[in-house]
């Protein structure tokens, strides 16, 4: 761990000369809400507009501006939005460019999302509310509709800049996803849209993109970037691009392999990435496909394999993956997944609609307009997200060490996973379970506190007291997550104005005919530490 902290510091130093705007350290305290502009809010705020999944739905920057309270009340401190530059105009065989990824002109804003004034107003209001703005940028390719005749006939003169064939790789279709040359130099998904692949290894191309992003960040006061398809450009391009931007960047590297993901940090190519390492075992452990042991294993390997797990972004949903609830619409499972994302190490990232339990499957069905929810602030997932974001901020406020305090595994077994994060007094001990709302009642013994500590469970507002070993009994029912803190941590806060003493749910258990099992969970680390 020490070695990885040292190299993390080295990675920070490597970027520090440039960070005048929001840097990695500041981003680590944040939590990100991912907004797809076309699907977040209409300018007039109406909620009855229906639209087809592959066509433009009409959401705008002004719509988002008018509905910022929804995000602020969820207690997110950053948003990540769709790319902002002008896209192609055509309706294609694979739909409209509603998502913003089909760049035509890097120097014009996307007028489907509004005017320059609308965008500037949005940025000003975000900053007034101390919400960071992360903008998605596309560097791998420009786009043009085509008629599916291979090779695509591209009119390069339509692009701004890059208005000549010489800036692009010659056409070939990516076919070998294991061959770096192939997936970096060939063209992605040639159907309906030609994603003309920029040759970012050419100095002329790299210099132009660097100069462009520097202008973009400073002209619009952008606080951070998501670099789309970072895995599909040459390695050397990335650090210079991020340095030119001068802000924290998270690069999309879609792989669950430790070495393939972590190399972007160990080689100083990128500061942060969405945490696809945890994504797969996390979702699988709720789908009868994997175990919390697998998740725990990946988490531990990433601590040494990557330089800085606190710069990764844990998530269970984004605009590319099937929604969590597409596999099971059990609400308790979704609550556990949400609790994990918000309380694990790293920069939590939640995709719009996740807090409304949207169920869309693969793209584009995972991009439902948020207005379909009526922006319901009483949804249990909305309430949970708001509470846990607030609790994380509270822990950060009490202890500057909280954010980069490595989570320790307190319990891991078939159905339960408990993590402890933060120094004594401001630690959060969170327990997730995959038992679902149909699961039976359980008690488990959980460590993570000191002898006789008064402990409060924040979601149910129940109290208990740690024993001589710092452990306590966690009563679990309805398959819901549990989140424990030291009682002193909640003094003079809005959390749990009233509490009751923690106990099992005997009535429900007998009603279901299920036996109340007692599972003596494996208490790792902490029990041993306090007995020693
Ligand atoms: C990041 O920015 C903050 C606030 O401006 C500053 O205090 C800190 O030193 C910066 N950290 C790095 C590593 O540049
Ligand atoms: C491109 O390759 C993919 C496999 O990666 C294949 O499914 C697709 O049909 C190919 N498209 C063209 C136009 O060759
Ligand atoms: C990798 O892909 C490139 C570009 O398509 C190709 O020229 C090369 O032969 C491939 N290498 C291997 C080992 O398949
Ligand atoms: C940023 O503003 C400058 C000055 O108006 C302009 O020349 C440049 O093209 C702008 N860059 C972008 C990416 O909009
Ligand atoms: C929970 O995980 C256990 C252990 O892998 C597995 O047997 C069970 O099917 C999982 N339950 C759900 C709902 O995924």
Image (cartoon, rainbow, N blue to C red):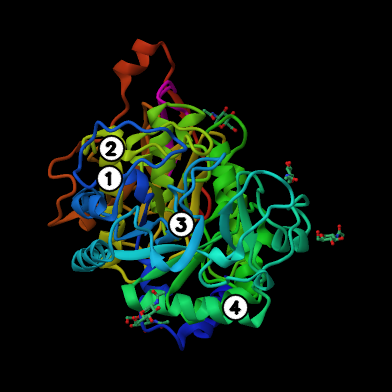
In the picture, the quarter occupied by the N terminus is bottom right
Q: Residue at x 28, y 33 (%)?
A: 49
Sequence order check, earlier mark of 1 and 2: 1
Judge by depth and name the residue closer to the eye, 25 or 303: 25
Sequence order check, earlier mark of 3 and 4: 3
* Res. 132 mark: none
Q: Are marks 1 and 2 in contact (CB under 8 Å)?
A: yes
Sequence order check, earlier mark of 2 and 3: 3
Q: Is residue 491 left or right of residue 126?
A: left
Report, in whole angstroms, how far the alpha carbon at label 1 lies from the one at label 3: 20 Å
Q: Is residue 423 visible?
A: no
User: The residue tagged with tag 1: helix, strand or loop?
Assistant: loop
In which quadrant of the rendered view does residue 393 lie? bottom left
User: Dot 2 corresponds to which residue?
Assistant: 371
Q: Is residue 184 above or below residue 95?
A: below
Report, in whole angstroms, how far the alpha carbon at label 1 lies from the one at label 4: 35 Å
Which marked residue is nearer to the observer: mark 3 or mark 4? Answer: 3
User: Dot 1 corresponds to which residue?
Assistant: 41
User: The residue tagged with tag 4: helix, strand or loop?
Assistant: helix
Q: Is residue 493 above or below residue 96?
A: below
User: Dot 3 corresponds to which residue?
Assistant: 87
Which marked residue is nearer to the observer: mark 2 or mark 3? Answer: 3
User: Dot 4 corresponds to which residue?
Assistant: 206
The quarter of the image that holds ligand 1 is bottom left
Residue 230, x across and y down, in percent:
59, 63
Badge 4: residue crowd in 10 Å (few <14, some 14–19, many ≥20): many
Residue 205, x across and y down, in percent:
61, 77
Q: Which residues are magenta?
A: 435-446
Residue labelled 2 has its Cβ within 8 Å of some atom of ligand 4: no
Q: Residue at x 53, y 50 (%)?
A: 524
């Amino acid at each position: 761990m020490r070695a990885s902290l040292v190299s993390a510091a080295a990675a920070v130093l490597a970027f520090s000369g440039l960070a005048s705007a929001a840097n990695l350290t500041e981003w680590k305290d944040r939590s990100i809400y991912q907004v797809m502009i076309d699907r977040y809010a209409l300018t007039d705020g109406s909620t009855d507009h229906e639209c087809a999944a592959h066509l433009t739905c009409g959401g705008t920057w002004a719509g988002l501006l008018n509905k910022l309270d929804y995000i602020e009340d969820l207690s997110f401190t950053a948003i990540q939005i769709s790319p902002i530059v002008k896209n192609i105009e055509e309706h294609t065989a694979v739909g409209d460019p509603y998502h913003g990824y089909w760049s035509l002109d890097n120097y014009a804003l996307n007028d489907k999302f509004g005017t320059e004034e609308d965008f500037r107003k949005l940025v000003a209001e975000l900053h007034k509310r101390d919400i960071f703005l992360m903008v998605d940028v596309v560097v791998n390719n420009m786009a043009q509709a085509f008629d599916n005749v291979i090779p695509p006939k591209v009119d390069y003169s339509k692009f701004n800049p890059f208005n000549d064939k010489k800036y692009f790789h010659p056409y070939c279709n990516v076919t070998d996803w294991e061959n770096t040359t192939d997936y970096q130099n060939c063209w992605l998904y040639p159907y309906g849209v030609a994603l003309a692949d920029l040759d970012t290894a050419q100095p002329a191309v790299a210099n132009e993109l660097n100069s462009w992003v520097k202008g973009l960040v400073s002209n619009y006061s952008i606080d951070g970037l998501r670099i789309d398809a970072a895995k599909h450009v040459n390695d050397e391009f990335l650090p210079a691009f991020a340095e030119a931007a001068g802000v924290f960047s998270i690069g999309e590297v879609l792989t669950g392999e430790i070495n393939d993901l972590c190399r972007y940090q160990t080689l100083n190519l990128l500061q942060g990435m969405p945490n696809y390492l945890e994504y797969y075992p996390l979702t699988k452990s709720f789908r009868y496909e994997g175990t919390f042991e697998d998740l725990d294993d990946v988490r531990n390997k990433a601590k040494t394999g990557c330089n800085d797990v606190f710069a990764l972004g844990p998530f269970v949903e984004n605009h590319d993956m099937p929604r969590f609830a597409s596999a099971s619409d059990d609400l308790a499972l979704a609550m556990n997944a949400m609790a994990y994302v918000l309380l694990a190490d790293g920069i939590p990232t939640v995709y719009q609609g996740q807090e409304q339990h949207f169920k869309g499957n693969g793209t584009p069905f995972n991009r439902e307009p948020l207005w379909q929810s009526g922006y319901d602030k009483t949804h249990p997932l909305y309430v949970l997200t708001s509470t846990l974001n607030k609790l994380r901020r509270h822990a950060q406020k009490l202890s500057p060490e909280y954010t980069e305090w490595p989570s320790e595994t307190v319990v891991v077994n078939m159905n339960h996973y408990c993590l402890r994060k933060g120094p004594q007094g401001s630690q959060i001990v969170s327990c997730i379970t995959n038992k679902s709302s149909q699961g039976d009642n359980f008690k488990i013994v959980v460590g993570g506190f000191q002898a006789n500590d008064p402990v409060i469970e924040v979601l149910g507002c129940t109290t208990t007291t740690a024993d001589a070993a710092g452990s306590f009994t966690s009563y679990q029912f309805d398959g819901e997550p549990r989140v424990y803190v030291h009682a002193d941590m909640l003094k003079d806060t809005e959390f749990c104005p009233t509490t009751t003493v923690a106990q099992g749910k005997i009535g429900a258990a007998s009603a279901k005919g299920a036996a109340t099992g007692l599972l003596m969970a494996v208490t790792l680390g902490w029990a041993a530490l306090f007995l020693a």
